Amino acid sequence: MSDVLRIENLGHSYGKFKVIEDISLSIGKGEMSALIGPNGAGKTTFYNAISGHFPPTKGKVFLNGEEITGLTSHKVVDKGMCRSFQITNIFSELTVLENVIAPLIIQRGKHFKIYGNIFKDKQIVDSAMQTLEQVGLSDRADQVVANLAYGDKRLVEMAIVLARKPSVVLLDEPTAGMNPEETENMIALIKKLATGSGTTFFITEHDMKVVFSLAEKIYVLHQGHLLAQGSPEQIRSNEQVQEAYLGRKVHA
Ligand SMILES: Nc1ncnc2c1ncn2[C@@H]1O[C@H](COP(=O)(O)OP(=O)(O)OP(=O)(O)O)[C@@H](O)[C@H]1O
């Protein structure tokens, strides 16, 4: 399996405070991985440093073999790695379709004007509709996002991420705030999206049920260091991981 995302000795400090240190990992094409860790372990910092939110203070990031360390988030997206932001990048006064069209227009270097004719490029509209189909929102394409249920807003966010056909999708707590039914639906959707698509998903999530339902490989971050990595079974039975999470070993 060829590496899609490779991270070498990544580190980040806020001033003198080293938050993450010496993280190296490599993720293969089409793999479904998860990054977990107790609160404050450094997960958000790690995500921010690899996705262009800010440059890491140490280390290198490679996407599809090309170094992307320190590129802006827009450039990282152009290179093929998109990240979800938990609804914050959704225009709630626009329709579902308009929300998905907007990044596609911007991707082509054009200005997105809310009051312009944003539907004139058939290729873009078709592509956006295809993405809405994928996430199960095509029947709500014309609905204003503000009127959608919370779970559907998260689907819009997913559609925005997928619209650009990224090779790597970073999902930041894809089920946060969802009710059990919405959570089940999101798990099923991510599985469907990942199956056979060749898209690589890398999620961070607090809900262990979600993590263990989805991930083929789990990375555990603890106090800024990669404490363990392995299959769900290996992580579940890892005593160091149990101690990091629970402060004690768990006996079966
Ligand atoms: N901008 C910042 N300036 C200084 N310290 C920060 C900053 N952002 C985060 N930190 C600190 O860095 C550490 C790691 O934070 P981070 O948000 O990356 O962890 P996390 O694993 O995502 O936590 P959580 O699961 O609670 O979201 C914490 O101690 C946090 O207080």
Image (cartoon, helix red, strand yellow):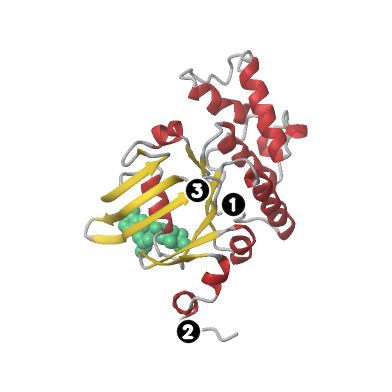
Per the image, the residue denoted by label 2 is 248
Q: In this rendering, would 64 be left or right of 196?
A: left
Name which residue type carries label 3.
Met
The CB of the residue at mark 2 lies under 8 Å from ligand 1: no
Q: Secondary structure at mark 3?
A: loop
Residue closest to the far right: 139
Report, in whole angstroms, how far the alpha carbon at label 2 lies from the one at label 3: 36 Å
Q: Nearer the viewer, residue 234 or 211?
A: 234
Q: In this rendering, would 149 be left or right of 41?
A: right
Residue pictured at 64% horizontal, 25% vertical: 127
Q: Where does residue 250 sit, x and y in percent of width and height? A: 54, 83
Upstream in sequence: badge 2 or badge 3: 3
Per the image, the residue denoted by label 3 is 1
Say if residue 119 shows up in the picture.
no
Q: How many marks?
A: 3
Q: Is residue 91 above or below residue 87?
A: above
Per the image, the residue denoted by label 1 is 174
Q: Where does residue 211 sit, x and y in percent of width and height? A: 59, 61
Q: Where does residue 88 sit, x and y in percent of width and height? A: 53, 42
